[in-house]
Amino acid sequence: MPEANMEKPAEVKLRIAWTTVETPEDANRLAHAIMESRQAACVQIDGPVRSLFHWEGKLESSNEVRLWIKYPKQNESALQKLVDEAHPYEVPQWVAVDAVAVMTAYGEWASSVAPSQ
């Protein structure tokens, strides 16, 4: 079976970040702010997910909604600033990783809809 046309790791400039919010409404609001800024190519929303974490000296547990954000690596600073300012949490989760294998066509599409800023 032929392999999909994938960019080589050195060429990949796409990152994937995730964050969580309390409600679907918060997720939609944040996703729209991100997409309207054109900093990201795509935001996917899923959940609920169950999160356990320490907050103010107590072990907490809550249902949250997760956002997966795909964006050009060069937009990292501006996107992180936007999320920090628009996020409803006092300390937003922001975890980002490089996409190590991206189909060429998808990478080209992502770059075209969220140009490096």
Image (tube, grey):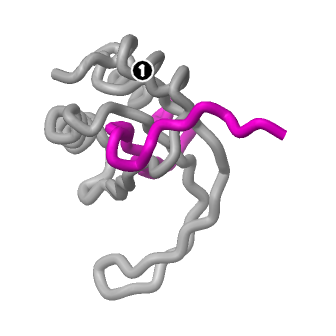
Residue shown at 46% from the left, 27% from the top: 107
Relative side of 103 to 98, left or right: right
Image spot of residue 98 (x, y percent): 38, 51
Q: How many numbered callouts?
A: 1
Is 16 part of what is drawn in magenta? yes
Residue 87 in the image: above or below residue 34: below
Magenta span: 1-28
Q: Of 2 and 104, which appears nearest the observer?
A: 2
Residue shown at 47% from the left, 37% from the top: 7
Image spot of residue 13 (x, y percent): 32, 38
Residue type at tag 1:
His
Disc 1 target residue: 32
Residue shown at 66% from the left, 51% from the top: 48
Q: Residue furthest right?
A: 1
Residue 108 in the image: above or below residue 27: above
Q: Quadrant of the C terminus?
A: top left
Q: Of 37 and 111, which appears nearest the observer?
A: 111
Q: Of 35 and 74, which appears nearest the observer?
A: 74
Image spot of residue 3 (x, y percent): 71, 39
Q: Of 10 and 65, which appears nearest the observer?
A: 10
